[in-house]
Amino acid sequence: MNHVISVQVENKPGVLARVASMFAGRGFNIHSLAVGPTADPTLSRMTVVVDGPEMEQIIKQLYKLVHTVKVTELPAGQGLEREIMMLRVNAEASRRGEIMESAAIFKAKTVDVGVSTLTFELSGDPDALADFLELMRPYGIVDLVKSGRIAMARDTKSKDGNKARLRSA
Amino acid sequence: MSQTMTGAQALIYALERQGVDIMFGVPGGAILPAYDPILDSKIRHVLARHEQGAGHMASGYAHATGRVGVMVATSGPGATNLITPLQDCYMDSIPVVAITGQVATHAIGNDAFQEAHTWGISMPATKHNYLVTDANDIPEVINEAFHLAATGRPGPILVDLPKDVLAATMTWHEPEEIKLPGYKPSVRGHPKQVKAAIELIQESARPVLYTGGGVIRAEASAELTRFAEMANLPVVTTLMARGAIADSHPLTLGMSGMHGCYTATTAIQQSDLLIAMAARFDDRVTGDVAAFAPHARVIHVDVDPAEIGKVRNPDVPIVGDAKVVLEQLLEELEKKLAGGAAPERAEWFDQLARWQRDYPLAFDQDPHGPIQQQYVISEINRISGKDTIVVAGVGQHQMWAAQFWGFEKPNTWINSGGLGTMGYAVPAAVGAQAGMPEETVWAIDGDGCFQMTMQELITASVEGIPVKIAVMNNGALGMVKQWQKLFYHERFSAVDLTDHTPNYVKLAEAMGCVGIRAEKPEEVAPAIEKAMATKDQPVVVEFVCDPEAMVFPMVVAGGSNDNVIMRPEDLPDPRGPQPEDEI
Ligand SMILES: Cc1ncc(C[n+]2csc(CCOP(=O)(O)OP(=O)(O)O)c2C)c(N)n1
Ligand SMILES: [Mg+2]
C-alpha cells in the first residue's frame, strides 16, 4: 500500500541527495518524489510516496538526517493529494471527436494538437488521473509525464480548537 | 579576535578552539594550505603512513578518551582512504571529525587531478558532512561539525575544504549560534515511560539488563552498575559494551551473542524482561530475530529514536541519553522501593549460577602443546593489570579477547564491532596510546589483520608512542578458516597465510620496534614481561599459536540463540545426513 509523507527540510545544497541516498541505502522504495520551495525560503518540502510496511522506520530515518525539520505522514485518502500529468495519445482524425469528449468529462485541458496526436493536461486527485489514463489507453499512449504527487494535510481545526472537518475537496 | 587570515588559518584556529590537541593525517596537494599553519599551532600532528591508519587512530583516540578524534587527508585518494574508518566510526557511534582537502571550487566536477566526489562518497558513511564553498563559513562549519560529532548519538562528520577556500582571505568572526532546526536530540526520557519501566522491572521474575556500547559512549557505567545493584538485575554486555560494568561484579554474566558465553546468551533467551540499555539488537547479538528472547517483554532505552522498534518492538520505549535515563530510573526506583529491597529473584539467580557452573568459558593450555590464544590473552591480562587498554583486530583473536579479558573499567576495550574492520588494531592502538600516554595499551591482533595496517608501527616509533602489539600468529585468516571448516566441508579457500610467513621479529625491528617471539607456552609470560618492561618503544610480540583452534561457544549465523554450540562435535553435520548414519 502507498503512504504519503510530507517532509520539511532545510533548503540546503544536496538535501535531495541525502534523502534519496537514505532511501536507497536502507532499501526503502520510493514510488514518487516531488520537491519544491515553501513559503519560507529557508525550507523546502518533499512529498514522498512510498511502498511498504516500514513507515515508522522511514519516518525515523528521515528525522535522523540533520537537515530534516519535520516529517508528517498523511493518512491514506485523508490528505489533500494532487498530481499533474501530460498525456499524448494517438488521435486519427476519425477518432478525435470521441477522444475530446472523453477528455471533457475529466476536464482535461488540450495543450497540444499534432497531425495525428492530441496532448492533454490533467491535474487532480491521483485516482482521477489513473481513471483517465485507463480511458485513453485503448487509443494508444504515445507519451506520458507525471509530476509525482504533492500533498497537504487538511485543516481540521475548528475555531474553538476542537478537531472538526470544516470542508472537504 | 577579528583578524584577517586565510581559510586554512581559520580552520586550524577553529580546531584549537574546539580543544583539539592532536590530529592524525597525511598531507597532499589540495590540503597543502592547511598544513602550513599547523607548523605554528600547538596542535600535535601525527603523520600516519596511510590515511586509513590516520582514521583508525582518530577513532582509537576518541574511544579511549571520549573526546572527538580528528583525521586529515588530501583530496581524491586521501579522502577515499578515509571511508573505511568513517564507516567504522558510524557503525560504532564514535565521535570523529574528518578534514579533507578538495580541488579548487572552479575545478569541481571537471575530473580535475585528484578529484573525488568526497561529499557524495562520504554521505552514507557519516552522520553529516559538509562541502565548504566560502572561507567565511569555516567558523560555523567547524563548530557545527564538533557539535554534531559529540552530541546525540555520536558519529563521524566530514568537512571537505577546496584548496581555494583554504587559501582565501577571510576575517575571523565568532561562530554564530548553532542553528539546526531539525537536530534536537532527546536527553531526558519521558517520565511516564520511566515509571512504566520501573513497574515492569519490579514485576519481572527473570529480567536481564542487556547493555550496549551506548552506555560507554554516554559515560554511564557508574549509573548502570548502581541501577543493576539497586534493581537486582543480572547484566549482559554486548561486544561493544565490554567494560561498561566490571566483569568481577557478581551481577555480570559476560558477553552474549554469536560467540557470547552460554549463560549470557541463554539468560536473554529465557528472560521475561529485557532492559536494552543503549544497545541496538545487532544480528550478532540476536541471531534469528524471530526466535530471540521469545518470552521477554522489552524496555528499550536509546538516544537514537530510529533504533527503537528497528529490530524488535519494545513494550516501553525510552528515548534519551543513557546516563540521564539511568539517573531517572534510579530516582523512580528509589521512590518505588521506599527503603525496601528489590525482588530477590532467587530462582532466577540460582538458575544463572547453575549455567555458569555447568557451561563456563574455559580453555585448556597443554603445557607441551601449541600456544592457545586464550592463554596468551589471560596472561597479558594477569601481567599488565586491569587498567590496560585493550585494542583488538577482527577475527578469532578478537572474540577470544572479548571473552577472556576481565574488563574492569569502561573505555578499556576498543574494537571494531559494527563494521568488523580487519586492520583496526594497530592504528587504533596508536591513537588510544597517543590520547592516554600514561596507560598501558595492548593490541591483540591477528596475523592477517596485522599485515593490513602494520606500517603504522613506523608512525608509532617515530612519534614515540609505545604501544604493545600481540600478533596471534595462527598462520591463517582464522575466523574465515573456522567457517570453512564448519560450513564448507573443510574446503579451505584463500585462508592460509603460511606460504610465506614474514619474520615478525625482524619486521618489528625494521619498523623501529622491539620484536619478541614466543613459540611455546612457557615462553608466553616471559615475552609479555619483556614487553611490559619496554617503556619507550613500541613492541611487537609474535605468539606462534595453535592453527586449528576454533572459537566457541558459537551460534550459527542466522540460527536461534537457543542453540548455543559449546564444542565442534555439537554442530549439525554440514553435509546433512550421511550414509553411515542410516543404520
Ligand atoms: C577489511 C576486512 N576484510 C575481510 C574481512 C573478513 N574477515 C573477517 S575475520 C577474517 C580473518 C582475520 O584473520 P586474522 O587477522 O589472522 O585473525 P584470526 O581470525 O586468525 O584470529 C577475515 C578475512 C574483514 N572482517 N575485514
Ligand atoms: Mg590469524
Image (cartoon, coloured by chain):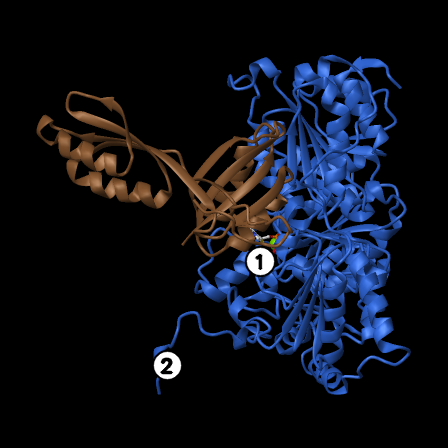
Chain colours: A brown, B blue
Q: Position of residue B230 (x, y in %)?
A: 85, 73
At horizontal 89% and vertical 19% (from top left) the residue drawn is B1
**As shown in the figure, which amino acid type bears the numbered disc 1?**
Lys
Mark 1 element type: loop
Q: Chain of mark 2?
A: B
Q: Position of residue B155 (x, y in %)?
A: 69, 43
From the viewer's side, name the closer residue of A42 and B502: A42
Vertically, is B61 above or below B255? above
Number of callouts in the render?
2
Crowding near pointer 2: few (<14 within 10 Å), some, many (20+)?
A: few
Look at mark 1 in the image and give the residue it sits on.
B310
Instruction: Using residue A31 as the reference point, say whether residue B212 is left or right of it.
Output: right
In this orientation, does residue A13 appear?
A: yes
Viewer-proximal residue among A133 and B1: A133
Left or right of B20 in this view: A8: left
Q: Quadrant of residue B76?
A: top right
Whichever of labels 2 and 1 marks the residue nearer the N terminus, that label is 1
Q: Which residue is mark 2?
A: B580
Classify mark 2: helix, strand or loop. Answer: helix
Give the residue type that dot 2 points to: Glu
* Inter-mark Cα distance, 2 to 1: 45 Å
Q: Quadrant of residue B294?
A: bottom right
Dot 1 falls on which chain? B
User: Any mark on residue B192, and which?
Assistant: none
